[in-house]
Amino acid sequence: MLLDIVIFGTIWGAIYTILALGFTLIFGVARILNLAYGAMYMVASYLIYSLVSGFGLSAVPAWLLAVAATSLAGMALYRVFIFPLRDSLGRVLIVTAGIAIFLQEVAVLVYSTEPRYVPTALPGSLAILGVRVTHQQLLTLAVAAVLVFLLHAFLVRTRLGRELRAVAQDTEMAALMGIPVERTYLLAMALSTALAAAAGALVAPFLTVNPEMGWSPLLVAFTIVVLGGLGSLWGTIAAAFIVAYAEMLTAFLISPQLRDVVTFGIMIFTLAFRPHGLFGKGIVE
Amino acid sequence: MTRRLAPRFALLLVAIGGLALVPLWVSNPYVLSVLTLAALYAIFASSWDILSGYIGQLNFGHAVFFGAGAYTTGFLGPHLPPLLVFPAGAAAAVVFAFLVGLPCLKLRGPYLSLTTLVFPLILERLAFTFRDVSGGEYGITVSSPLSAIGLYYASLGLLLATLGILLAVAESRIGRTFRAIGDDDQAAMAAGVNTTRFKLSAFVLGAGLAGLGGVLYAYHIRHVGPEIFGLFTSFSIVIMGIVGGMGTILGPALGAYFLTLLGESLREFETYRQLIYAAVMILCVMLFPQGLWGLGRALHRLLPRSGAAKDAR
């Protein structure tokens, strides 16, 4: 039991880290709270389902294609819907919520509400200290770690990454330094959506794919960002694992149905009592 | 103040009067049931507007309040006389107004919206989990003390009362304070306004009226289940408010009628209903942020007879 909690908490912590990093990227850089973020995760899951089950693609090209296509969709979404409303946080919130519902309903029309199953890329499982873990789950853990490492390297070592961080720190100053702010926002949106898609496509084989699946990751990502604060990689990672372990504790000790309730509770309590997050660099002004 | 309100009260009375006459020549029970539903949604959307439209704090979880009223009806309906179920439903909703409102007091903008969003989701999960209390996914069957026509007139009566109270509050000193907080809560605070108290009163007022509506909703549907706390239930109220025109009280009620009737007229496309709601809202936010009410006002201004003085606000 305890080992189950530790092992599955670690796997989910890694997935949540990717989800939260993607969410905080567009929020930190462009101050856009994208409620369609979870819908992008859902879209990527369905894409990989179609590519693998419908077109018979093998796992790796299907995964890359799903992530690239979703990322492009995210950029289009930014240009068409978010860009014209960007000055109003409230209207961005409303329009992205509308898009999330819209995409969910498109998924209902195309795939029906019937849950879908994505065949796993790596069949089989092994026992770690008596806990059965599938190879797909271990692969997910590994890919998540690689993605976090790559993102960190990109943000710290490349010119584009430094531009992203500069805009996040002080948009006006960055603009004065000649950084193309609008292009940076678009890049942030592309990366953010790609991370949501990467997470969606990674977990699809061990979850059921359904049209409503995007809301929970969106709210989890928001909770982690609230808890871990903005602009701190370590804060985000720590918060992601705290949320994941709390969820697994609840799922194993009380009821799997109450998994989300704990996350929502963490979100409410953090916002009410510790609005600056655990590490002080909060997002609530 | 009364002079500025008079045209809107007149419009309200004419509209409700017109709706009250409908059963005289329409006897189709299906039409009546749709109109009852539209009236109930109008109550939810207008009671949502006082916090969301006036104070500008977008509430994404209004379903908590009318859901509390509806579940109270499910729990207490068999044990209490109907006349006591209404105050009980309103009281339950007010309890939730404090539960949701207190953690939200310091929050603004998207933080408040997402916090309010998760409250109904928590209740939804709890209703699924603690099945012996809530009936799980099957919910609770409710028997109505009113006939279909009685429910129709009760809903219209409550709608009239709700809109009357909200319009009177919105145009009073309190409503102006709400607007001031919405425009700039720091400035309002600096001017000596107790923003905490006003925000909480907006929560309580909106919740209490929604709770009363929730009781009628449970009687009308004859059932209450966890889906009342579902995401789309809360979002459909937001959509009605935005499509109708936020911060106008009558606009969201209009939006509720418009979308409910639009949804029903496309009944053969039942699966498209949420899609259409979302699309209409996206169009509204992009193209007419003032909603139908703003559109109507703009058209009214174009009429040759209406002078500028008439449209002072």
Image: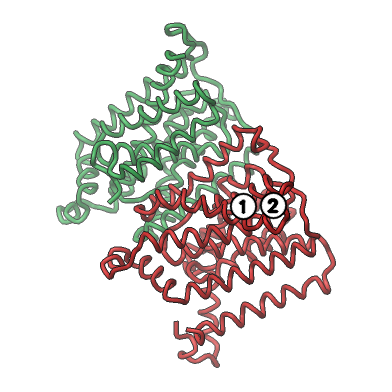
Q: Name the residue beneath numbered marker 2.
A: B218
Q: Is residue A214 visible to the viewer in this orientation of the structure? A: yes
Instruction: Determine whether label 2 and label 1 are within 8 Å by CB.
Output: yes
> Residue at position x 53%, y 42% from top?
B121
> Residue at position x 58%, y 61% from top?
B209
Element under disc 2: helix
- In depth, the one of B88 and B230 nearer the eye is B88
Q: Which chain is red?
A: B
Measured as percent of width and height from the top left, residue B85 is found at 67, 54
> Residue at position x 63%, y 55% from top?
B214
The picture quadrant where one finds residue A209 is: top right
Measured as percent of width and height from the top left, residue B36 is found at 72, 62
Q: The green chain is which one?
A: A
Query: Residue A90 vs residue A274: left or right?
Result: right
- Residue B69 is labelled as 1
Query: In this rendering, is residue A267 above or below B145?
Result: above
Residue count near mark 1 (Cα–Cα under 10 Å), binned few <14, some 14–19, many ≥20: many
- Mark 2–mark 1 distance (CA, rounded to whole Å): 8 Å
Query: In this rendering, is residue A18 above or below B208?
Result: above
Q: Going from the N terminus, do you reach mark 2 or mark 1 first? A: 1
Query: Residue B214 vs residue A16: left or right?
Result: right
The picture quadrant where one finds residue B147 is: bottom right
Q: Subunit of mark 2?
A: B
Query: In this rendering, is residue B216 above or below A277?
Result: below
The picture quadrant where one finds residue B219 is: bottom right
Measured as percent of width and height from the top left, residue A40 is found at 47, 41
Image quarter where the C terminus of chain B lies is: bottom left
Element under disc 1: helix
